[in-house]
Image (cartoon, rainbow, N blue to C red):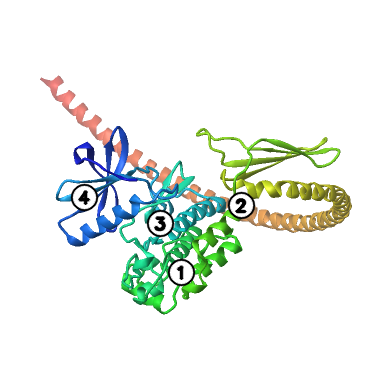
Amino acid sequence: MAENIKFEELQLSQQKVGVGSSGYVLQANWRDQEIAVKVYDLLYQKHRQTAEREIAQLSQIDHENIVKVYGSANDGGYGYLVMEYLEEGSLHNFLHGDDQREYTMEEAVSWARQCAEAMTYLHSMQPNPVMHRDIKPQNILFAETLSRLKICDFGSATDVATYLSNMKGTPAYMAPEVIQDEKYTTKCDIYSFGIMLWEMMSRQVPYSHLENPDNGWAVLEAVKKGARPLLDAVRGDCWEGIRKLIVRCWDPDPVRRPTAEQIAEYLGSLGGDFNYEDFILHLGDDILATVTFPKDPRGIRRIMRLEFWRRQERSIRLTIPILERETVRVGRVVGREAARVAEDVGREIPRAAKDGEREFRRAEKDAERETSRAAKDTEREVRRAEKDTERETSRAAKDTEREVRRAEKDMEREISRAAEDVGREVSRAAKDAGREIKQAGKHVEGAVRKLKKKLRF
């Protein structure tokens, strides 16, 4: 049972780790352990009533898949619900956050089964079953490195004896009878679970195919008209049984929806506890299968390794993703599948030998045909090359002859032009020499006259 806690014992931080339907959640410390504290503003009557209801509901609950409540505190203005702190975050953040880690069908089915078991517990409470009324990925928290989940936020929860007919919940996950203000039962949680199961199998936001998916009223109107998320959007490896379960859960008639107990029983039949001892299967005189369950650095078994060994043959290794609670289904079929593989191997080896022989003969014939075709092609190419060479040689000879004649004519023209140029230059040089001689004679005569004059004096 939850206890009354003195407010002074709580060491609240300012770090918000979530927002609920009627308050916000802070990370805190209490008695040397890390906790989460939901804070309610008691000045508002609606919030005060919600806090009283959530504290009362969670104080009675003790289940491994429902967040554990240690107690509550009050400082006059605010109420505080003291809960365990789950640091792995919500299913919503896992599906749509930045870190898009892949997950297997077995993991998703395990999460769905745990949620169904928690709903079974709530719907079976005495004297009055409890309806959560807001099942959605935001209210599903992970613990133990994603291997376990827990339902939180009971601000909308109520017991079945109340038989309320008012709208409570989130539009995309709200059952038609809730939307239409009809009286509803625990089957409204089943509807919400069906929408959430579709979201786990598609990793898409519900009704994202609508024109206004962010408009809550538009979503409500679409649901009233029979709209549902697109079933074709689920992952390709989704099991047919899970597809059918989704459709049954969101059936417009609450009576036709399965109970939480039926869902948990069905999902539980897909997996359970398992003995993780390595073992060897003898599949024949010369065939062995080894099955091992290695642990990762955190000590968690996430894969099953299956190896087939045949004398004088290379081994065949299969690595299968698993969850520890889900491997029983795999373990049950390992022997059957191993035997089938061994039989297939036995059939395939002689078939492969015959196929290899046929392929070898076909390859020989193909090689012969290709060799003959290549020889003919080569011969044609040689003849074509010879003809091309003859044509090119003749053309080159004619081109050479034309070029020689043209060069001779060009040379004659150049010689004649050069001779004319030389004649002109010689004539010009002779005239210039004559002028220079006359001018020199005049200079000599002048010099003689000057000399005679000086001699007379």
Q: Mark 4 and mark 3 in contact (Cβ < 8 Å)? A: no
Q: CA distance from mark 3 to mark 4?
A: 25 Å
Neighbours of disc 2 within 10 Å: few (<14), some (14-19), many (20+): few
Numbered label attached to residue 137:
3
Of the two numbered discs 2 and 3 in the rendering, the one whose residue sits closer to the viewer: 3
Say left or right for 224 vs 310.
left
In the rendered structure, which amino acid carries the disc numbered 3? Pro
Asked which secondary structure carries label 2, the reply is helix
Disc 4 vs disc 2: which is toward the camera? 4
What residue does disc 1 label?
A: 229
- Give residue 92's quadrant in the image: bottom left
> Residue 75 location, x and y as percent?
16, 46
Q: Secondary structure at mark 1?
A: loop
For residue 186, side relative to residue 438 (left or right): right
Position of 366 with respect to 406 (left or right) is right
Q: Is residue 30 above or below residue 89?
A: above
What residue sits 21% from the left and 62% below the top? 46
Q: How many angstroms separate mark 2 from mark 3 (CA)?
A: 99 Å
Front position in the image: 349 or 65: 65
